[in-house]
Structure formats: C-alpha cells, structure tokens
Amino acid sequence: MRPVLERFFALAGCFFLSFGIFADSSDPYWMILEKGKRLFQEGSYGDALLKFEDAIRVRREQYDNSKSALVEALSTFELRRLGDDLSSVESYIDSHNLHRARSALNALYGVAEKSEFNNSVNSVLSRLSDLEWYPEAEYWKGEVFRIEGETGVALIQYQKALDHAAVLEIPAEATSIRYRAAELRAVRLEYNEMEKILTKILEADSLWTSAKDGFARDAMARTIANDGADKFLKMYRHASPMTLRAHRMLGVYYYKSGRHDRALTQLLAAFLIASTEVLDALSRNNHEFAYTTLSAALDASYRIEDIEKYILDTKYYSILYYLAASLYANGHRQSSAALWRIVAKMPGAGEWAGRSSRQLVKPEIEEPTENPSIGN
C-alpha cells in the first residue's frame, strides 16, 4: 500500500478535476468533519483525509467571506468615523439594512459570546481571522498520517492544531492533542520533546508548577517516605484529572532513565490525583464510607465496576508499583515494601502483582536505559 502522502496527492488531482466526487460544499464544515471521522473509523484513510481537507476549505471560505463582508461595510465613510465602537457600528448596520454585514456578525455570535469582544470592532475582525483556521480538522489530518506511519507529518499537523487552539470548540481538546503528540514523540524515541510536551500539560496543575507550593510538595514527599501511604492519604487530597497521565508518564520515564528523585515527585502526584478520585468515588457510592487504609479502599473498589474500570484505565497499579520503586531507589525501603505488598495481593493488578511479589522477595533498582518503554 502506497504511503498516505503519495495516495493523497494522487487523489487530490482527481478531487480538483472532479470536484463533486469528494466535496460536500453544500454541507457545513462540521458535518464534513464528522463524515471524515466516520471514514477514518472505517479505515478509509485516503478518503477521510480529503474530507478533512474539504472541511478546512469550507470553514476558511465561510469565515473569510464573513470578514470580507464586514470589512466592505466598514470601509464606508459613515462607518469609518464610528471607529472601534462595535455597538454604534451594529446600530448603523441594522438601520441601513446591511444584510451581509449583519449575517457575518450573526455567524460570529453563533460561536462566540458578544461580550467577549469588549465592544471592539477590531476584536471582531481578529476573531474572524482566527476562525478561518479549523484546528479540529488539522488534528484529524494528523491522525491519518500517524496511523499510516507518516509520524513526522502527523506531528506537524498536531502542532498546527495547537497553534490555533484558541478556536477549538472544546478547549480541553488541546490537552488531548498534546498527549497524542507526546505519545508519538515517545514512539519516535524523541524523549526530550516528549518531556517538553508533558511538562506543558502540567502547567494546568498549580500544585506541581507553582513555586509557592514547593514546601507542600516537599512535605508530601516526607510524609509518604516516613509515614507511608495510609497516613499520606489521610492528610492530602488533590484533583487534577487532566494532568494525571502526564505525571505518570514523566514519573515512569524519570525512573527508567535513572532520575529517581524526579520520578518520586511525579509518581507521588499521579498517586495522589488518582487516589483522590478513587476515594471520592467510593464516598459517592457509599455515603457511609470512611477512609482507613489504602488496602481497604482498594478492596472496596474491586467490587465496584466503575471504580475498578477507572483504576485499570489510569494504570493505577503501575503507578503504585513505580512509586514504590522510586521510594526504594531513594532509600525509603519500609514505605516501598508496604506499597508492593498492597499491589501484590490485589486480584486485578495483573503483571504488577507479580512484579511486586518479586520485589518483596528480592528488591532491585532497574538499570537506567536511554530508550525506556513508558506506556501511554
């Protein structure tokens, strides 16, 4: 099978010669995107790529036309003298039946609150320029390239989507795109770039990025090292679900590359975030639940399908295993053994139970490696 880039350009020739075959010019851009995503799920990657291109084109034309219509109206003497005052400009547009300009503003207000523009015409024009980009479609183009092995091109597309993240319909999708880029960097063994991306994600977790919280982080590390996980979870809770995976990936990466102090910091964060969610879920499930020990909490979780699924999805047992390994590597053998004992007896822990059991018999620190497998 030819690489997707070669197939894309071959198909694109047919696309422009016979526009009606692939284009959905009568459909809104979001519907064309959805059609492309459906084709992607069906494995029709070349056709999906063309849909994503078409969605980008249709959106660009829509907002470019809107901006042109508004600029045309603003170029008249009467509107120029009103300056940047959006309310006055709108009143004039309505009183003089400038339908194209009104339609342009209505299209904009359909995707953005009028209050966001601070009564500024220039802000409206700037947003219309931004909206000519379609970051969601740029990302999905990247997904086609990724799955076809064109990883370098995929990363370019992810970055293009992130460069225009301000107009993502769901702002949180920027984090999902960064995770995808980080995973791909790891596959390409580009760990420095992976680390930069994951660190960027952590900017959303104030507890681990704010300098003023350094004392709190140090206190947390001392508590789990000296007093163990049970007391630690009696003292601390922290919710930052979007950064959990970044903490875990960085923690495993630092451990496997021999930076055990940094591994402990990141894995402790992952442990705290995931444990907070588990304990909160147990409380929602049973209002009489009261935390006593981590082992008892996990025993209770094993009997609740949704919580057990969360534990497996977040790789919670691997977090516990590597947190214990990092504690051991930093000289805290008692607290590390306590965590390994918990994992070793959990029926859902799989390979991590076996690895923990072996560590309890003969604990060892993994040899550092330049190309660690960190899991996504």
Image (spheres, rainbow, N blue to C red):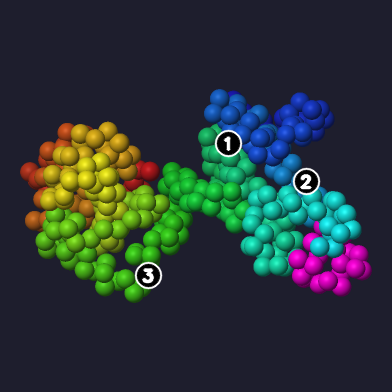
Q: Tell me the quarter of the picture where residue 199 sits.
A: bottom left
Total count of labels: 3
> How many angstroms separate mark 3 from mark 1 (CA)?
37 Å
Q: Which mark is residue 144?
A: 1
User: Circle 1: is it few (<14), some (14-19), or many (20+) Cα within 10 Å?
Assistant: many
- Residue type for callout 3: Ser
Q: Which mark is residue 210?
A: 3
Instruction: Determine the main secondary structure of the stretch shown in magenta.
Output: helix
| Secondary structure found at label 2 | helix
- Residue type for callout 1: Val
Specify whether residue 327 is in view: no
> How many angstroms separate mark 2 from mark 3 (CA)?
43 Å
Mark 3 and mark 1 residues within 8 Å of each other at the beta carbon: no
Can you tell which of label 3 and label 1 is closer to the viewer? 3
Q: Earlier in the sequence, mark 2 or mark 3?
A: 2
- Pick whichever, 222 or 241, lies toward us: 241
Q: Position of residue 243 (x, y in %)?
A: 38, 54
Q: Which residues are magenta?
A: 69-90
The magenta stretch spans residue 142: no
Q: Position of residue 102 (x, y in %)?
A: 80, 53
- At x 72% / y 44%, what residue is drawn? 59
From what the image shows, is residue 225 above or below residue 241? below
Q: Quadrant of the N terminus?
A: top right
Mark 1 and mark 2 residues within 8 Å of each other at the beta carbon: no
- At x 16% / y 55%, what residue is drawn? 229
Farthest front residue in view: 95
| Secondary structure found at label 3 | loop
Q: Which residue is mark 2?
A: 61
From what the image shows, is residue 31 above or below residue 273? above
